[in-house]
Amino acid sequence: MPLETFHASGALSMGIELELQLVGQHDRDLASAATDLLELTRRKPFPGDIKPEMTDSMIEVATDIHVRHDALLSQLEAMRDTLLDSAGKLNVSLCGGGTHPFQHWYERRIFSAPRFQQLSGLYGYLAKQFTVFGQHVHIGMPDADSALRVLHTLGRYVPHFIALSASSPFSQGSDTLFDSARLNSVFAFPLSGRAPFALEWHHFEHDYFANMEATGIVRSMKDFYWDIRPKPEYGTIELRVCDTPLTVGRAAEIAVYLQALCSSILAGEEAGPVEDDYLVYTYNRFQACRFGLDGLLVHPRTHDTVTLRDDIDATLARLEPHARLLGSTQALDSLRHMISADGNDACRLRTVHARTHNLLAVVDEAVAAFAQ
């Protein structure tokens, strides 16, 4: 089918999708409780959107469209509280985190929905291994060409969002030595990675998407697992590299950081993207996954090397005028404090494990953080 027309939305409007873990209250392993939880939450109005995900140990929730941090956070908190109330009746806990520390992928069950069953048939065991949990952020774009320009300009900042959200240091019972092990599961899919370099929607639609569709490989934008992808039906770009943070507060902070960056790009304050910017993309992305805030970042234009911690701090400082206009100064200040003092969520979970030597305690920490 032809690519859907890009429906321009309110510039810099935003929405969040969060994939959440369903955890048994007794054994702290993943629980096959998605069907029951969805049924409970649908018995009364839910303050957002809720739907199943690939396996029956996870759900996805989504906010409405917002322009201000305070309203976004308020809805996220309301969604969290409603979910916790329903899950408690099922003896199930919820938490963020990009991976569950010790679940076994082969024990998972694909959710009984046609699309998930089709993906399971196509991808085999990769579908069950995709029981990982991410945050997706949508930012509204004024038009299709602006969406592509912003998407490719953001390539230089993708490692920022990986490092800030990283919350998946443990997987399959082991410390992976990565801050974000979740993205290693995404890499396995053939249509992952970065979007093709195109700055005009006409070329993207007719020279790329139409040719891909003709191969029979793809039918819609849903078939692409790119780090950032355009969503023409929403009129947004969608950032997909983030782990689900441990708290909804951190999720909102990351969203408004992206909003402020997009504001700067749309205002013409960033150099226009060129394809050579991607020469260092994979290296920088790996550094963020492996080392988090302590990873190294090579600037695509100057080739200077800085730590992600320092580059994020400098960027947050530069975005202060945009944060003031957007009402997100406090949220970005919280991120600056995190990178200078507290560390990301991966650091938080590793600190608990170093103290307890117990992965059950790591899950307890994630559950308590989500409920705070």
Image: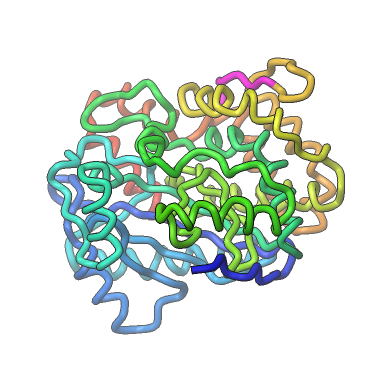
Q: Give the percent coordinates (x, y) of residue 306.
A: 68, 18
Q: Is residue 175 magenta?
A: no
Q: Give the percent coordinates (x, y) of residue 43.
A: 29, 83
Decide: is 281 above or below 36: above
Q: Give the percent coordinates (x, y) of residue 274.
A: 75, 35
Q: Give the percent coordinates (x, y) of residue 74.
A: 55, 66
Decide: is 107 above or below 18: above
Residue toward you, 116 or 20: 116
Decide: is 25 above or below 167: below
Residue at (46% x, 48% y) in the render: 225
Q: Which residues are magenta?
A: 292-298
Decide: is 274 above or below 303: below
Instruction: Using the rendered view, name the quadrant where residue 145 is placed.
Output: bottom right
Q: Is residue 329 visible?
A: no
Residue at (18% x, 54% y) in the render: 31
Residue at (64% x, 22% y) in the render: 297
Instruction: Using the rendered view, name the quadrant where residue 42 is placed.
Output: bottom left
Q: Is residue 272 left or right of residue 165?
A: right
